[in-house]
Amino acid sequence: MARREPVIPRLDAQAFAERVSRMPLRRDIVGVATMNRATTSPRRKPKPGTAGPRSTGRLQRAIDATVAREIKTALAEAGGVITDAARLLGISRIALRARMNALGIRG
């Protein structure tokens, strides 16, 4: 039986890289060109204690004051134990720590 040529020709690494670099980017899938990561800026992690309000409007300040008051009350009821205060508030300990950092509350 005669040997057949493969349907997909084999490419060496350089030929493959050249072929891929000529491919059009699929902007409709991800919304932006993501082919070359070297030209895009890396995502930055927020600094600790900066996960606070997205705005500084009057309503947000009132909400922050209410949340801070509730956290302080729960901490007082729990005797300063953050895990117990989080349980009283119905949130995780990590979420409570994040809110405390954002609002400047020391535990």
Image (tube, helix red, strand yellow):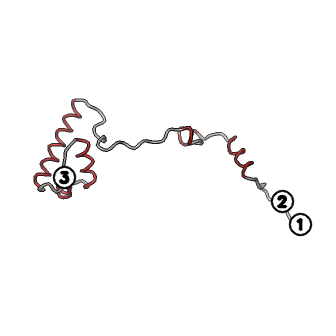
Q: For residue 7, what is the image quadrant?
A: bottom right
Residues at marks 2 and 1 touching, judged by CB atoms closer than 8 Å: no
Query: How far separated are the C-alphas under marks 3 and 1?
Result: 76 Å
How far across and down, in percent of the image, does residue 65 sit?
A: 17, 38
**Dot 1 alpha-carbon crowd within 10 angstroms: few under 14, some 14 to 19, many 20 or more:** few
How far across and down, in percent of the image, does residue 60 sit?
A: 23, 34
In the picture of the structure, the residue carrying the numbered disc 1 is 2
How far across and down, in percent of the image, does residue 3 sit?
A: 86, 65
Query: How far separated are the C-alphas under marks 3 and 2?
Result: 69 Å
**Dot 3 alpha-carbon crowd within 10 angstroms: few under 14, some 14 to 19, many 20 or more:** some
Question: Which tag, 3 or 2, sits closer to the chain's start?
Answer: 2
How far across and down, in percent of the image, does residue 71 sit?
A: 17, 47
In the picture of the structure, the residue carrying the numbered disc 2 is 5
Query: How far separated are the C-alphas under marks 2 and 1?
Result: 10 Å
**Judging from the image, what secondary structure is the residue with disc 2 in?**
loop
Residues at marks 3 and 2 touching, judged by CB atoms closer than 8 Å: no
Q: Is residue 46 left or right of residue 36?
A: left
The residue lying at 22 percent from left, 42 percent from top is 104
Question: Which tag, 3 or 1, sits closer to the chain's start?
Answer: 1
Name the image quarter holding the N terminus. Answer: bottom right
Furthest-top residue in this view: 57
Question: Label 3 amino acid?
Answer: Leu
**Dot 2 alpha-carbon crowd within 10 angstroms: few under 14, some 14 to 19, many 20 or more:** few
In the picture of the structure, the residue carrying the numbered disc 3 is 89
**Judging from the image, what secondary structure is the residue with disc 1 in?**
loop
Question: Label 1 amino acid?
Answer: Ala
Question: Label 2 amino acid?
Answer: Glu
**Judging from the image, what secondary structure is the residue with disc 3 in?**
helix
Furthest-bottom residue in this view: 1
